[in-house]
Image (cartoon, rainbow, N blue to C red):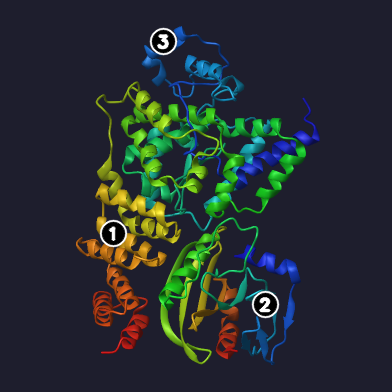
């Protein structure tokens, strides 16, 4: 997962997302974070973090279309990632996310629950999960998404199970709750 | 003698490359005419020696690591020019049980690197910790390695690929994909014995010395840095990429195969199962160029390997006489608790054609077929190409004919019905799933979907 970010970061570096004011995400979404985050951007993807993306990150994948991958392109990645198909259901998006994370080297990915949820004012879904990185770091995550006009909008918060994930989960939930699709 | 700085650097980095890539052994790649007691000593044996050896199988089964007579087979091969590296390149003395290299040797550097890699592997997210499965494989490795039992440690890695690796220091890793593909103990023993053969013949060390000797400093450094970013057990594709750098030579492989057969015979396993491992893999790979090049690039096709293994199997003395133990029931019992994970991990790869061929052969094999049919259906559902909906439905239907079909088969069937616009069937199928799995983690989602299908 960290390698996904490395390429994005290499291009632009981190910039500040100032808390307390609305901010556009990848020109297709908007959020109103209560606190400040650092962000890196790349195409349809933005990654926000506080302590560093390995420890905790909020990943926005905006306007994912038929044939797109769920992670930003990375020329160094050898694995071919599975593709989003416009025919996919919420259950299948969760499976796609799982298989994507496994492809980039994680293990023991377990979906802990999936349920319907209104996201950005639209009927969407939410799923929670655990996995371990190849190096053995235990991580937790929660994803919220909407399938709209055959496109996927997915916001995923992940972090180290120990300390960092729970520490900023409320901040991530606050951002997720504030998301709008433009 | 004082080593130059560059030698030190190269020796050190070589160790790391191996440690980092860890794909020290593509067990699948190679051909060999492994003599039963092929060994290190450079030789110029004649056909007479060859004949002599064939009449003395007892010699071959003696201490498996102290064979010092490379065979005429090897000599003949060399003369025919079918391979470039020669058995006589190897001048490394054998290991004794419990032996560690002298602390001042460059081999000790490599062991130290591997020890560090092993500590990382032990805490990797991919390692399977289940005590029962670890005990089962540990016992097999012990049985196969005999006096060297204490020198080999096995780590089971959750990687859905056919592979196993062997480090210079006795660290063996077995990928879960291998467990799914072996059909019995003897087939698994084929690969484990092969890996132990690499250890006993110190192939890692030979390989690293070879790399350092043959590669210029700069090129080697580039290879090394390319490997640096890779975690100990990185993504499968990265491991594959590392294979070309860290894999053993063809001679190493053929020698390891010979040792593997010997060890199998000594442990009482049927060496006649060895060829089947490669037959199965060959069938699974089909004629997919990409898959084939992964396994066989720069090596001949495996049919030759199968033929030689079949011949050699007839020469290997088997402990306890008879044709040796196959161990199907014990193997299935050990795998059974992990069966769903093994199948699900295979589907997660989304390499549909290979997986389809593998699953068909597992269905033919007949173990826990309901689960195999279910995951075969899952594969079609995820692929989602024309005709896949019907293929999925038919696999799900087949699954329900067996007691071990998971309840998820009803959810999966509902998803296909929903995709086809068959609302009533979808609703009934989802309802059946919820009825059978009232505590399902996705129950709320499924009930929501039922609601969306009307009444």
The N terminus of chain B, quarter of image: top right
Letter of the chain that mark 2 sits on in the rendering: A
Q: Which mark is residue A50?
A: 2
Label pair 1/2, CB-CB below 8 angstroms: no
Residue B139, how many percent across, how many down? 37, 40
Residue at the image position 54 percent from the left and 39 percent from the top: B297
Tell which residue pokes out farthest to the top in this image: B48
Which residue does the numbered mark 3 point to in the structure image?
A: B51
Q: Which mark is residue B373?
A: 1
Q: Does A98 sit left or right of B325 as displayed?
A: right
Q: Does B346 sit left or right of B82 as displayed?
A: left
Q: In this view, does A42 lie above or below B362?
A: below
Crowd around label 1: few <14 · some 14–19 · many ≥20 (10 Å) = many
Q: Between marks 3 and 2, how big is the CA–CA gap? A: 72 Å
Letter of the chain that mark 1 sits on in the rendering: B
Q: Is mark 2 on a helix, strand or loop?
A: loop
Q: Nearer the N terminus, badge 3 or badge 1?
A: 3
B145 and B85: which one is in front?
A: B85
């Amino acid at each position: 997962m960290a390698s996904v970010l490395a390429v994005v970061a290499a291009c632009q570096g981190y910039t500040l997302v100032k808390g307390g004011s609305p901010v556009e995400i990848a020109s297709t979404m908007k959020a109103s974070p209560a606190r400040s985050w650092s962000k890196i951007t790349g195409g349809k993807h933005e990654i926000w973090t506080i302590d560093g993306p390995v420890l905790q990150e909020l990943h926005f994948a905006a306007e994912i279309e038929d044939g797109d991958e769920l992670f930003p392109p990375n020329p160094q990645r050898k694995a071919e990632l599975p593709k989003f198909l416009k025919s996919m259901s919420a259950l299948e998006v969760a499976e796609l996310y799982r298989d994507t994370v496994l492809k980039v080297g994680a293990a023991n990915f377990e979906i802990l629950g999936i349920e319907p949820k209104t996201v950005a004012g639209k009927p969407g879904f939410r799923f929670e999960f655990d996995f371990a990185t190849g190096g053995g770091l235990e991580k937790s995550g929660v994803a919220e998404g909407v399938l709209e006009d055959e496109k996927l909008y997915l916001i995923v918060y992940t972090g180290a199970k120990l300390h960092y994930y729970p520490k900023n989960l409320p901040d991530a939930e606050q951002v997720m709750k504030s998301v709008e699709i433009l | 003698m004082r080593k130059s700085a560059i030698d030190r650097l190269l020796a050190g980095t070589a160790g790391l490359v191996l440690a980092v890539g860890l794909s020290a052994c593509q067990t699948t790649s190679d051909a060999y005419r492994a003599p039963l007691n092929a060994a290190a000593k450079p030789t110029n044996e004649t056909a007479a020696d060859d004949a002599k050896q064939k009449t003395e199988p007892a010699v071959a089964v003696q201490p498996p690591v102290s064979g010092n007579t490379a065979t005429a087979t090897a000599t003949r091969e060399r003369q025919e020019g079918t391979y470039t590296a020669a058995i006589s390149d190897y001048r490394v003395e054998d290991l004794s049980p419990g032996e560690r290299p002298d602390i001042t040797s460059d081999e000790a550097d490599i062991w130290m690197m591997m020890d560090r890699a092993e500590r990382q592997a032990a805490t990797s997210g991919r390692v399977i910790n289940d005590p029962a499965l670890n005990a089962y494989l540990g016992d097999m490795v012990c049985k196969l390695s005999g006096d060297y039992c204490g020198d080999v440690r096995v780590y089971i890695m959750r990687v859905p690929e056919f592979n196993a690796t062997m480090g210079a220091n006795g660290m063996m890793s077995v990928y879960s994909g291998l467990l799914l593909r072996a059909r019995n103990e003897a087939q698994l023993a084929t690969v484990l014995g092969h890996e132990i053969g690499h250890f006993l013949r110190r192939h890692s060390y030979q390989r690293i010395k070879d790399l350092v000797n043959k590669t210029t400093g700069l090129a080697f450094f580039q290879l090394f840095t390319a490997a640096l970013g890779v975690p100990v057990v990185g993504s499968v594709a990265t491991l594959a990429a590392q294979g070309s750098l860290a894999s053993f030579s063809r001679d190493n492989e053929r020698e390891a195969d010979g040792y593997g057969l010997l060890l199998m015979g000594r442990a009482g396993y049927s060496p006649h199962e060895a060829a089947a491992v490669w037959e199965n893999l060959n069938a699974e790979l089909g004629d997919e160029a990409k898959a084939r090049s992964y396994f066989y690039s720069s090596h001949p096709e495996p049919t030759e390997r199968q033929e030689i293994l079949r011949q050699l199997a007839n020469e290997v003395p088997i402990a306890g006489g008879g044709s040796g133990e196959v161990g199907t029931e014990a193997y299935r019992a050990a795998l059974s608790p992990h069966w769903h994970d093994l199948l699900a991990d295979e589907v997660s790869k989304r390499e549909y054609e290979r997986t389809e061929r593998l699953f068909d052969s597992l269905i033919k094999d007949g173990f826990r077929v309901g689960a195999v049919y279910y995951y075969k259906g899952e594969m079609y559902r995820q692929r989602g190409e024309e005709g896949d909906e019907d293929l999925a439905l038919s696999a799900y239907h087949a699954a329900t004919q067996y007691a071990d079909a998971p309840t998820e088969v009803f959810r999966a069937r509902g998803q296909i019905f929903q995709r086809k616009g068959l609302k009533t069937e979808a609703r009934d199928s989802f309802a059946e799933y919820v009825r059978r799995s009232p505590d399902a983690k996705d129950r709320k989602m499924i009930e929501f979907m039922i609601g969306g299908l009307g009444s």
